[in-house]
Image (cartoon, grey):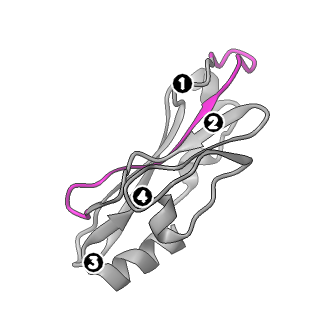
Amino acid sequence: MKLQNAYIAESGDQLGNWFLIGYKGPGTVTTAGSKTTAETSASTNFVYTGEFAGSVVLATGGIGWKAANKAKLNDCAGDGATYNWTITIAAGSAAGEATYTPNVANDNCETLTPSFKSIK
């Protein structure tokens, strides 16, 4: 979030993809990001990516970070393509301010990461 906030401060009203803000996802990069493509990384149990293919206007917002478990974890279904954890970025009330809203797809996945929704 600090990297995204710094990017917004420098650009004025833009959100950047992971490449543009200088973020590297956990694990190994499986799809390299660029100024126009989203980066994807993977660890043993998860796949991570963001929705932005480049930069987007802050007012447009979108999902800046998401994670999918590759296999079922307890009762949390996973296939590596269903993103059970997301962080949505939206414009805040002040100019150049972003708000971050973490979400977990269902209660079965939330029990694995009970503090995830506290990320701000």
> Which numbered tag is attached to residue 47?
2
Residue receiving disc 3:
96
Name, please, the residue furthest toward the right: 44
CA separation, marks 3 and 1? 32 Å
* Callout 1 amino acid: Ala
In magenta stretch: residue 76: yes
Q: Residue at x 70, y 16 (%)?
A: 72
Residue receiving disc 4:
100
Count neighbours of disc 1 (C-alpha within 10 A) and say few if under 14, some if 14 to 19, many if 20 or more.
Answer: few
- Labelled pair 2, 4 in contact (Cβ < 8 Å): no
CA separation, marks 2 and 1? 8 Å
Ranked by sequence position, the earlier of labels 1 and 4 is 1
* Callout 4 amino acid: Tyr
CA separation, marks 3 and 2? 30 Å
Labels 3, 1: front one: 1
- Labelled pair 2, 1 in contact (Cβ < 8 Å): yes
Residue receiving disc 1:
81
